[in-house]
Image: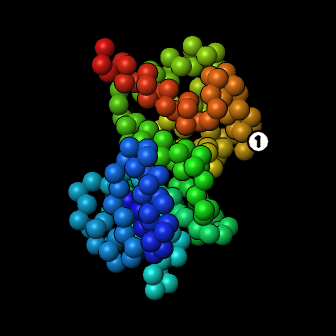
Amino acid sequence: MVVDDNPRVLRSVERLLQRGGFCSRSFQTYGAAADAIRDFKSPPVLSMIDLVLDHGRLGTELAAEIRTRFGHSPIIAILSGYQVDNEATSNADTYLEKPLGLRATSDLLMRAVLAHVRLHPALNSSVLELATIHGLSPQEAKILGSLVSGTSRAKLASVIGLSPNTVKSQIRQILSKTGSASLSDVLSNVLDVTHRHSTS
């Protein structure tokens, strides 16, 4: 689900999502999005919501409605053209600054997909298999497992109990050991292994 009062931004994000093979529902007004949320039978896999919407309504209010209706299951990203403080994004999992970069958007989409399928029984064994094949340390495997379960990079340090610099270093190690250019590549490998397990 994409909510932004700027039609150009809506079209850009829709194109990015379509390139990634995702279908999306887009809304240009707070009211239209809020009405749709009430009608949804299940949560959207990913919600990308502009910080300031029509008539001065805040995207964080819409994020709170999604959380109230569905709990913590969907991933919510707040979009803004300027840097915002943590309080402004308290109901969100992550914050993306406009204009949206392809890498940040791709990483977010991959996290959303992985969070959506995280209950798949082969997922944990896929992480362990990749960790074993590539010689990841137990800490690196734990970080990879947390990323696969949908934990954002921003929240990873507090969830695991490490400093942000240690987490960055560990992620660099994961990328290096797996020969991956980005976390999206690593997470894509986890999905590939999971798919291979489920079809064999």
Residue 196 located left or right of residue 179? left
Task: Assign the N terminus to one quadrant of the image.
Answer: bottom left
Task: Assign the C terminus to one quadrant of the image.
Answer: top left
Up/down of 39 relative to 74, above or below: below
Three-letter amino acid code at the position of disc 1: Asn
Give the secondary structure at mark 1. helix
Q: Quadrant of residue 185?
A: top right
| Residue drawn at x 60%, y 53% as measured from the top left | 101
In-front residue for pair 191/148: 191
Up/down of 150 relative to 79, above or below: above
| Residue drawn at x 59%, y 36% as measured from the top left | 183
Residue 21 located left or right of residue 50? left
Q: Residue furthest bottom?
A: 55
| Residue drawn at x 48%, y 27% as measured from the top left | 190
Number of numbered discs present? 1
Percent coordinates x, y for residue 35 in the rendering: 28, 72
Give the class, few, some or many, for how many residues have Cα within 10 Å of label 1's Cα (few <14, many ≥20). few
| Residue drawn at x 39%, y 76% as measured from the top left | 29
Percent coordinates x, y for residue 54 in the rendering: 45, 81
Whether residue 155 appears in this view of the structure is no
In-front residue for pair 52/159: 52
Up/down of 71 relative to 114, above or below: below
Residue 170 located left or right of residue 144? right
Percent coordinates x, y for residue 26 in the rendering: 36, 64
Percent coordinates x, y for residue 5 in the rendering: 45, 75
Q: Which residue is mark 1?
A: 165
Whether residue 78 appears in this view of the structure is yes
